[in-house]
Amino acid sequence: MIPVERFAASLRRLNIDFFTGVPCSYMKQFVSYAQTCDDLPYVAAASEGEAIAIACGAFLAGRTPMVLIQNSGLGNCVNPLTSLALPYQIPMLLAVSHRGEAGQDAPQHRIMGEITYPLLELMGVAAFPLPAESRAADELLEKLCRTSLDQMRPVATVVSKGTFEPYAYDAPLPARRKAGLVKSLDPVDSRPLSRFETLQTIVKVLDENDLLISTTGMTSRELFSIADRDSCFYMAGSMGCAPGIALGLSLNRPGRRVVLIDGDGAFLMKMGTSATIGHYAPPGLVHIVLDNGTYETTGSQRTVSSSVAFERVAAAVGYPRALALPDADTLARVLSAFRIGDGPMLLSLRILDGHAEGVPRVGRAFPELRDRFRKAALAKLRLS
């Protein structure tokens, strides 16, 4: 068996410096160790797919991430792996437990136990079993990390039961925080704007130091057509993953304003990420939800947002401030006044359904978007 301290030291030598995931009993020793070590930053994700998105954001902020998940949740990673990490060519190391290995487990684990390796292979993720002996494990980890960075893609090691030595873990639960400030501003005599008009208003108040993440679909396409910037990361898939990317980015670039432009349907798809954001409280993150009440890109089918108060959800899960705004001008004023330390803040705004005609797809290759955004995220702040 591998001592977790030895395993952690091996990862440090390989410059793996950010961890996130959903734990499994097969890896509980290492996750418990990571949660008690200041030099092993670990973010407890609400879902496996969210963990992939957080790791992508951490990489864009200059980190080398590792994701730890149970194989029963591997299905939750299919979309963010195949629509985000793989097409954008973002390297990361996955540690996937092998529940149901050789059929020796509870019934709900047996099918995934049979298909863990085939599923990873089908997605193009090279996967190798983690040896239970430290030196052999070190050699495999070095090979996997080199492959991941050379090929700019996720790779995986699969962890069997009994791989890690026991580790005593006795940390107190954190104190429960109070709900954040909720405020709805009364409408002024103004009409709702389209998303295109709202994005134009937002862009006007951003400066060159701001890092911008835009959700998938027409939001990214319209934003790209309005103002293509190196500091914009346009999502073209992996719906619901934008908040995870923004969280991983903002935690690792705490001195930068990170502006997340989300949609109602995307927010609802992975609402659990808002709880993770509220818990880890990145001080520079402002989360904008543009709510048109529909899945507009796919034909304007209705979402359930008419019965959801996004600002109350955000406040309940720990955002210090959450505002329902009456119009785009108010959004612009609040965003312009946002400073590091005010976040995370959620701003929700009702907008009109529909999109601008003739808006092209984002005219950049995904690896190009990755590289230029990462360069912008790691650049020094420009003084105005």
Image: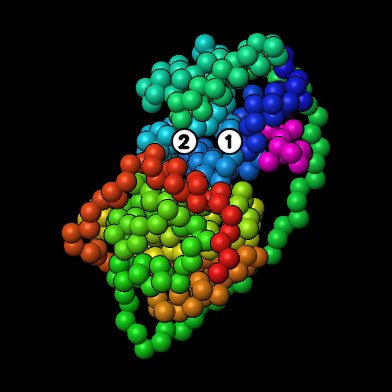
Question: Can residue 255 be spotted in the picture?
Answer: yes
**Which mark, residue 65?**
1
Q: Which residue is mark 2?
A: 90
On whether residue 359 falls in the magenta region, the answer is no
Separation (CA) of disc 1 from disc 2: 10 Å
Q: Is residue 155 left or right of residue 225?
A: right
| 163 lies above or below 240 | above
Quadrant location, the C terminus:
bottom right
Q: Secondary structure at mark 2?
A: loop
> Can you give x and y, in whole percent of width and height, for residue 43 in the image?
63, 43
Query: Who is closer to the viewer here, 270 or 105?
Result: 270
On whether residue 38 falls in the magenta region, the answer is yes
Quadrant location, the N terminus:
top right
Image point (60%, 19%), residue name:
142
Q: Is residue 218 left or right of residue 65?
A: left
Q: Secondary structure at mark 1?
A: strand
Please give the range of residues in magenta.
28-41
Image point (42%, 34%), residue name:
89
Q: Are marks 1 and 2 in contact (CB under 8 Å)?
A: no
Q: Which residue sits furthest bottom?
A: 189
The amino acid marked with disc number 1 is: Pro
The amino acid marked with disc number 2 is: Ile
